[in-house]
Amino acid sequence: MAPQTTSEVWDSRWSSTRRTVEPKVIDNIFEAYKALAMHRKRGMQMVDGGGKEIQVILESSTGTAEAFDGYDPLSKSPVDPFESAFYKRRYYAVPIVLDDTTNWENSGEEQVFDLLEALGSNALNSLLKAINEDLLGAQTGKTMLGYQDIIADAGTGTVGGINSSTSSFWQNQKYTTAKTFTTQGTTNVFDGMLAWNTIMDDCRKQGGKNNAIVTTYSVAAAYRTALSSQGYGEVRLSNVTGINGPEFPSYMGAELVADNDCASIHSYHIDTDALKLRVMKQANFKKTPFVSLQSNGQLAQLAYMVAGVQLTTNNRRRSGVATQITGI
């Protein structure tokens, strides 16, 4: 049997190390990116094959039910209440480069373990940072869709190949009046809460369960302060188990997620059954095999950590955005 190449040796070591540390490393790193961690907790959907696009079937209308008796004639007209949205698969990659001198200098078992754990953590952290930023942003170039595309400020736009200007069912909810958590327009009720009540009611009227609110730390902190001023803070915070832990209380059953990447003065009110982060099975934060860079005149090994992801929805109406919510 031919001896292993340097690339094969490092692949073998990587596999052994990752089996040991991966669950702990992934959990800890995901937790740093709150919106992404929330989607992970509530179920990222694995996608296997199917070409360059993800097809999501959605219900655009309902059929017609008829009341009848005895031999009354019934309608024979066919009804097609479904449409399909198509989402392009998007991919992210981070290089992992290991020079041969580092290999020679870290030949001990513990040194190898520490080195590969550090490389893996850095690569995963780099991937998650980019994906979380794009999740809360707007699509540019080859990036994935973000909240600002699917839960748009204007409530409109083309998503998944469906234009909301010609398909009114494909519009998200929006609340655009400026409100703050430091002003009480109604006795003992802060204006920010009135805004959240309105947008969440609009979503729930469309069948949305609105189980998560993603916003800025400033807005989340202002909401917490508003509750505390009314004597609710200690009671609510003591039992919070969301992504931010006991830092922020929930709101009307919705988990409050504060994320540094959220657009200023925005809060996104999300039905996580309708808005799904999909991950490609073949590119599920996986490392490619190491290859030698000797042909480039370098004594080094190169691999990539890759992720295939896309944000999709089957019902834009069930999520919404408040665009003028100020905090402190």
Image: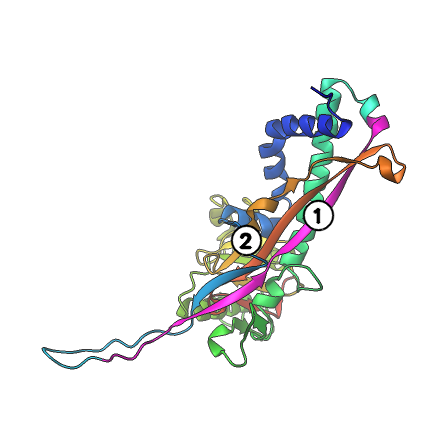
Q: Compared with residue 69, is residue 183 higher up or lower down, i.e. above or below? A: above
* Dominant secondary structure of the residues highlighted in magenta in the image: strand
User: Residues in magenta?
Assistant: 75-102
Q: Which mark is residue 319?
A: none
Q: Is residue 190 visible?
A: no
Q: Compared with residue 180, is residue 34 higher up or lower down, i.e. above or below? A: above
Q: Residues within 10 Å of mark 1 (few under 14, many from 20)?
A: many
Say which quarter of the image contains residue 65.
bottom left
Residue 48 colored magenta?
A: no
* Residue kind at label 2, given as amino acid type: Arg
Instruction: Provide residue 278's location: percent of width, then percent of height.
Output: 54, 53
Q: Which mark is residue 93?
A: 1
Instruction: Provide residue 252's location: percent of width, then percent of height.
Output: 44, 58
Tell me the CA gap for discs 2 and 1: 16 Å
12 on left or right of 244: right
Q: Residues within 10 Å of mark 2 (few under 14, many from 20)?
A: many
Q: Residue furthest front?
A: 1
Q: Compared with residue 90, is residue 161 higher up or lower down, i.e. above or below? A: below
The residue lying at 54 percent from left, 69 percent from top is 191
83 on left or right of 312: left
130 on left or right of 154: right
Q: What residue sits right under mark 2 in the picture?
A: 278
Instruction: Provide residue 128's location: percent of width, then percent of height.
Output: 66, 47
The residue lying at 53 percent from left, 77 percent from top is 164
